[in-house]
Image (cartoon, rainbow, N blue to C red):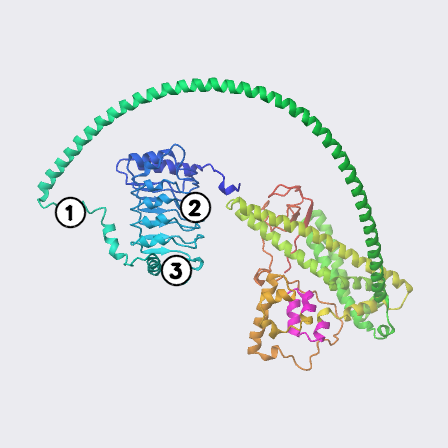
Amino acid sequence: MPLFFRKRKPSEEARKRLEYQMCLAKEAGADDILDISKCELSEIPFGAFATCKVLQKKVLIVHTNHLTSLLPKSCSLLSLVTIKVLDLHDNQLSALPDDIGQLTALQVLNVERNQLTYLPRSIGNLTQLQTLNVKDNKLKELPDTLGELRSLRTLDISENEIQRLPQLLAHVRTLETLSLDASSMIYPPQEVCSAGTQAIQQFLCKESGLEYYSPSQYLLPVLEQDGADTSRDSPDGPTGRVSREEAEWQNRFSDYEKRKEQKMLEKLEFERRLELGQREHAQLLQQSNNQKDEILQTVKEEQSRLEQGLSEHQRHLDAERQRLQEQLKQTEQNISNRIQRLLQENQRQKKSSEILKSLENERIRMEQLMSITQEETENLRRREIASAMQQMLTESCKNRLIQMAYESQRQSLVQQTCSSMAEMDERFQQILSWQQMDQNKAISQILQESAMQKAAFEALQVKKDLMHRQIRNQIKLIETELLQLTQLEVKRKALDTEALQEMISEQRWALSSLLRQLLKEKARREEELREILTELEAKSETKQENYWLIQYQRLLNQKPLSLKLQEEGLERQLAALLVDLSAEHYLPLFAHHRISLDTLSRMSPADLAKVGVSEAGLQHEILRRVQELLDAARIQPELLNPPKGEVLGAPEEPTAPEELPESVSPSAPPAELELPTSECVVCLEREAQMIFLNCGHVCCCHQCCQPLRTCPLCRREITQRLRLYHSS
C-alpha cells in the first residue's frame, strides 16, 4: 500500500488544533459552526458527532484531512440531522454512507477532490439540498435519484469520468448552474453541453417530454420556504399573537406529557417481553450447546479416520514425487550439459572471428598510420612545424606548471610551500629563458631533439582526439550537475519532503556511477593513445629522417569530418552550428539527407527525430539556433553568403591547435554553462572543490577534505576524490 494511504498519526500541532476547536464549539455563546479542518484526521472523532447532536450545530467543516470514511464505528448519521452545511473536500473518501438521505436539513454538500466512485441513491432524499459539489473524483455515472432534488441550484460534476447525464435531471427545475466536462460528454452531445446549463436543461426536458421553464420561476418559493411561517404577521396584532402562541405551547406541553406516559408504558411492556425472550434464548442456547458437543465428537472421530487415510496416501505420493524429481533432475542435467557445450562452441567461434577481424582492421590502420609517402617527405614544412611544436610544448608546460604551483599553494605546509615555490621559480625561469631564446635556436633545438618532437605530437594527438574530447565534455557536465544537486540537497534538506530527497539521491547516485564509468573510459582512451604512440615510436626506430615532424604535419593537415562534408555540399553555417552544439557526430546524417538551413526552418522536432537526432533538448536547440541565424540573415544577407575568395578547405599556416570549446549539450539554456559555486560545509569559508565518490557530493574544499574518510553529508565512505578546476 502506498505511503500516502497509510494511516498517519496526527502531529502535535494538529492535535492541539483539534482540541481547541472542540473546546471552542462547546463554549457558551459559540456559533453554529464546528470547524475541525486541517487536523490530519483519519476518521471523525466520536466527540464531534456528540457535539453536533447536543448543541444542534448547523455547519460541519472537515476539509483537508485524511478521511477514508465519513462514519466511524459506533456512530450514527442521525447525530448530524441538524447539519445544513457539510464540507468534506480534500480528503480520501471512497464512498458516502448509503443512508446519507437521513440528513434532511442539508443544504450544501461539498466533497470536491476525493476518491468517490459512486453516489448513493438515497441522496435523492435531500430535498433541501441547494449546492452539490463532486468535482475531481472518480465518478463514472450519476444516480437517477438526482432528479428528486427539488431545491438544487448548483451542481458541479467536472473533472470526473462521467459521459452521460440522467434524463430525470430535467425534473430539477431550480438548477441554475451545471458544471461539467463538455468535451467528454456523450449524452447530451458535446455541442449542447458547451452551450451552458439552460441548453442542457432544455435538451433533457425535450427528451423527457416536459415543457421547459426558467429556474427563476421556481427559486423564490425555495428560498423563502424556511422563513415563510415566521415572516407572517398575525392580523390580531402582537398581543393576540402572544396569547395564541402561549396556548399553542400549552397544548404542545400537554401532548408531550401524554406521549411521555405512553412511552413509559411501552418501555415497561418492552422490558417484560425482553426478559421472556432472554429466558427462551438461554434455553435454546443450552440445547444448541448440547447438540454442538455431540456433533463435535462425531466430527473428531471422522477426522481421525480421514487423517490416517490421508497420511498413508501422502506417503505414497511422496515416494512417487521423489522418483519423478530424480528423473527430472537427470534430464535437466543432460540438457544443461548440451546447452553449455553449444554455448562454448558458439563463443569460441565468435571470439576467433572477432579476433581475426580486429587484427585485420588493426593491421590496415597501422599500415595507413605508419606509411609515410614520398610526397609527404617532400612537402614537409620543417620550420613551420617546428614552430608549432614549440608553441604546443610551451603551452603544455605552462599549464602543468601553473597547476602544480596552484596545488602547492593550497596543500603544503609553510616549509614545504617555500621549497616548492623555489622549485617553481626555477621552472618559470626556465620557461622565461625559453621564451627569450632566439626563435631560430628554439626551432633548431626542436628539429634536433626527437624526444621534444614526440612530446609535441603526443599533446597534439590528445587534443585532436574526438572521443577524448567528448569524454571530457561529459565529465564536465556531470561535475556541474553533481555540484548543483549537492547545493540543492544542502539548501532543502531541512525543508523538502522525503520523496524529493529520495529523487535527488537517486539522481546523484546515477550521475556518480556515470562519472566513474567516464573516468574509466577516459583512462582507457588515454592508454589506447599511448599504445599508438608506442607503436609509432617502434616504427620510428628505422631512423627515418624527420619522422615525428612528418607525423605532426599529417595530424595538422588532416581534415576533420565536418570539412569533408562541407566540401560535399553541407552549408558552412550549419556545420559550424552542429560543431558548436557538440553534435558533430550528426554531420553525416545531415549531409546524407541534404538538409539545409532553409529545410530546417520548416522542420519540427518530430522530423528531426525521424532523421535520427534522438535527444529532445538538442532537437529544440538546433531549430532555435537555425531560426535565429535566418532572422539575422534577413537583416544582414552577407552572413549566409561568404565572400567568393573564401575557401573552406584552404590550408592555413600550421600553428599549435586551439582547444575547441567544450560546449554543453543543448538540454539546458546556455546561461547555465558556468559552474555554480558553493561554500565548504566544514570550514564555511572556502569554495567547495572536491567530488567524493561513491556518493557524488561536492561539499568540501581541498584543504578540509584531506583528513576526511567519510562524506560530511551522507557519512558514506570516500573511495575516490576528484578535484574541480574553475577556468577563468
Please give the label number shown on residue 116: 2
- In the rendered structure, find residue 232 and report the number of the disc placed on it: 1
As for residue 497 lying within the magenta part, the answer is: no
Query: Compared with residue 642, is residue 292 higher up or lower down, i.e. above or below?
Result: above
Q: Residue at x 26, y 25 (%)?
A: 266
| Quadrant in the picture for residue 45 | top left
Q: Looking at the magenta stretch, what is its main secondary structure?
A: helix
Q: Secondary structure at mark 2?
A: loop
In the image, which disc is placed on residue 97?
none
Q: Callout 3, which amino acid?
A: Cys
The mark nearer the N terminus, 3 or 1, is: 3
The part of the chain drawn in magenta is 563-589
Q: Residue furthest bottom?
A: 644
Residue 315 in view, yes or no: yes
- Closer to the camera, 341 or 494? 341
Label 2 or label 1, whichever comes before in sequence order: 2
* The stretch drawn in magenta includes residue 565: yes
Give the amino acid type for the residue marked by disc 2 in the picture: Leu
Label 3 or label 1, whichever lies nearer to me, is 3
Q: Residue furthest right?
A: 542
Q: From this view, report whether residue 590 is shown above or below residue 151.
A: below
Residue position for label 3:
193
Q: Secondary structure at mark 1?
A: loop
Q: Earlier in the sequence, mark 3 or mark 2?
A: 2
Q: Are marks 3 and 2 in contact (CB under 8 Å)?
A: no
